[in-house]
Amino acid sequence: MDFYEVLGKRVSTRKFSDEKVSDKDIEKLIDAANKAPIGMGTYDECRLTVIRDKSFIEEISKEYMEKMDKKSDPLFGAPLLIIFSSSKENDLRFQDAGCVLENISLAATSLNLGSCYIRGTFHNLGKDGAYIEKLNLDDGFSPVAGIVIGHPESKLVGKDHIIPTNFI
């Protein structure tokens, strides 16, 4: 798929089929993540956790819903969740996460997979969320954001957004 076609089709997906994402596609998503820019080139201060275990994804959703008294699934029943974690304590961790997860989102779109950037769930669960222990992160690392991925229930159709732009 042409790069501009990918950009045109990329959209946040919140309805997924039960079909699993293939190992081959997951490898491509991780390759895209590894090509993202990281502030100060500190790739060693970043970690990715790929979660294919649907029951663990549901456990994270349930923990969030109980803590925040919410009724809707914040991870949208997706079959795949990739969490970006960092050991950075400054704002660069958010910028790093954005770059990495956008690369994953674009790669997912090129594979006709749907995706949705997830930050609020991890922010609200904080560094002490019960699920974190199961991530097997190195000491000093904590989740920053994530992305859910799966086969969309319907065809990917992008939206025409326009950001007001000043030219000087």
Image: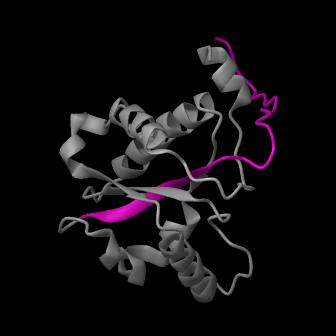
Closer-to-camera residue (94/62): 62
Region in magenta: 141-168
In magenta segment, residue 34: no
Left or right: 82, with 111 as reference point = left
Closer-to-camera residue (49/65): 49
Left or right: 162, with 6 as reference point = right
For the point 54% across and 59% down, which residue is it? 119
- For the N terminus, the quadrant is top right
For the point 32% across and 55% down, which residue is it? 90
For the point 57% across and 75% down, which residue is it? 58
Across and down, in percent, residue 113 comes to 63, 40
In magenta segment, residue 147: yes
Residue 10's place in the image compared with 8, above or below, is below
Across and down, in percent, residue 117 comes to 58, 51
Q: Principal SS element in the magenta part?
A: loop
For the point 53% across and 56% down, which residue is it? 80
- For the C terminus, the quadrant is top right
